[in-house]
Image (cartoon, rainbow, N blue to C red):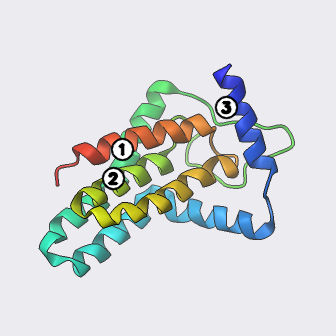
Amino acid sequence: MLRALDSRVLYAMRTRLHAPAAETAGKWLGRIGEYGAVWLVIGIVLAFADPDNGENWVVAGILGPVAIGLNFLVKVIVRRPRPVLEGLPPLGGAPSSLSFPSAHATSSFACATAMTRIAPEAAVLFLLAAAIAACRPYLGMHYPSDVLGGAVLGIGLGLIAPL
């Protein structure tokens, strides 16, 4: 039943609201989320903006790429293949054929969580994390449950990061 729901939600995300501008935005979000790089940049910028917490901001930013590595270990254990929707190819590429959990979601939620621990007003970064995560099934790269699993893993990593 959950698998069927996951597939139905994925199909809906791949077939609705796919105007060219929306697809361009989704692809752009996917690119900036690659390897957790956007989070490293945000961490460095915030370190300059808030030098009293500079080291913590950098650690929180580095968590993005670190989370990608930890995520890959989970992918290798779970071995869930990426979704295949007949007639709806994915709108992006991926470094592996493994799907669960979403590395974009893991790194984004890890960093947003860690950065919110440094400064509660950084909670606004959860909007960016959610957008990056949501673009993955929208582009056909992940099942929605991959994103949910990645978000849960990321929040856990963000809570235990040594800040």
Q: Which residue is mark 1?
A: 155
Which residue is the extreme one toward the front?
121
Q: Which residue is mark 2?
A: 113
- 128 lies above or below 146: below
Q: Earlier in the sequence, mark 1 or mark 2?
A: 2
Q: CA distance from mark 3 to mark 1?
A: 21 Å
Can residue 98 be seen at all in this image of the molecule?
no
Amino acid on which disc 1 is placed: Ile
Residue 163's spot in the image, x, y percent? 17, 55
Amino acid on which disc 3 is placed: Asp
Which residue is the extreme one toward the left?
52
Q: Which residue is mark 3?
A: 6
Q: Label 2 neighbourhood size at 10 Å, few (<14), some (14-19), many (20+)?
A: many
Q: CA distance from mark 1 to mark 2?
A: 6 Å
Name which residue lies at 66% across and 67% down: 25
Q: Label 1 neighbourhood size at 10 Å, few (<14), some (14-19), many (20+)?
A: many
Residue 95's spot in the image, x, y percent? 55, 48
Residue 77's spot in the image, x, y percent? 44, 26
Name which residue lies at 28% across and 62% down: 120
Is there CB contact under 8 Å for labels 3 and 2? no
Numbered disc 3: secondary structure: helix
Residue 71's spot in the image, x, y percent? 41, 40
Q: Label 3 neighbourhood size at 10 Å, few (<14), some (14-19), many (20+)?
A: some
Numbered disc 2: secondary structure: helix
Closer to the camera in the image, 28 or 13:
13
